[in-house]
Each structure stands twice: as structure tokens, then as C-alpha cells.
Image (cartoon, rainbow, N blue to C red):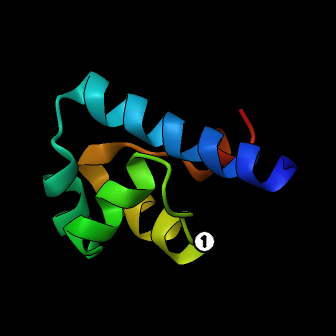
Amino acid sequence: MLKASFETSVSKRIREKLLSKGIPFKVAAEKAGIPAKRFYRVMDGSSSLHADEVEKLCRVEELELNPTELLCP
């Protein structure tokens, strides 16, 4: 249960950041090199976010995602 809660909170923080910056999920997925369909499943909580995907998202400058903030709020 802790694992699911952790994954949900990371996805939630990413979702909140994208919404606050007005960046569509599709754009974030494309820039990070994550298939849009997969990214939507992660954002709606039906799929888990992998560590390499967190890294890809954090490398997209305009998203301004900090891995420390995502993983250790």
C-alpha cells in the first residue's frame, strides 16, 4: 500500500506542476520522450511511473521539475 501511495503522490506532484504551468500532458510526454498514451495512464493513476520516466521529465527544462521535490516533498 505504501508503494501505491508513493507512486500516486509523485504523479500528483507532476500533474499539479504541469497544470500550474499550463503545459498539456501531451506536450510534456512528447518533450520527455514518453508515449502520450502511457503518460496519460500515469497521470490518471492507472499505471506506475518508472524511475527513468521521472528522470526524462526532470530533464525537460521548461517543466522545471526537481527530482528531490518530487521524491521527497
Counting labels gives 1
For the point 24% across and 67% down, the residue is 37
Residue 59 appears in which quarter of the rendering? Answer: bottom left
Whether residue 6 is situated above or below residue 57 in the rendered picture = above
Residue 58 appears in which quarter of the rendering? Answer: bottom left
Front one among 4 and 69: 4
| Residue 43 position in % (x across, y down) | 40, 48
| Residue 72 position in % (x across, y down) | 75, 41
Front one among 30 and 66: 30
| Residue 62 position in % (x across, y down) | 24, 46
Whether residue 65 is situated above or below residue 12 in the rendered picture = below
Whether residue 20 is situated above or below residue 6 in the rendered picture = above
Residue 42 appears in which quarter of the rendering? Answer: bottom left
Element at label 1: helix
Dot 1 amino acid type? Ala
Q: Which residue was labeled with disc 1? A: 51
Whether residue 60 is situated above or below residue 53 in the rendered picture = above
In the rendered structure, the answer to whether residue 41 lies left or right of residue 72 reads left
Residue furthest top in the image: 20
For the point 24% across and 28% down, the residue is 21
For the point 59% across and 52% down, the residue is 67
Front one among 58 and 14: 14
In the rendered structure, the answer to whether residue 66 lies left or right of residue 22 reads right
Residue furthest right in the image: 2
| Residue 2 position in % (x across, y down) | 86, 48
Other-residue count near label 1 (Cα within 10 Å), few / some / many at <14 / 14–19 / ≥20: few
In the rendered structure, the answer to whether residue 20 lies left or right of residue 51 reads left
For the point 63% across and 38% down, the residue is 9
Is the C terminus in the top left, top right, bottom left or bottom right quadrant? top right
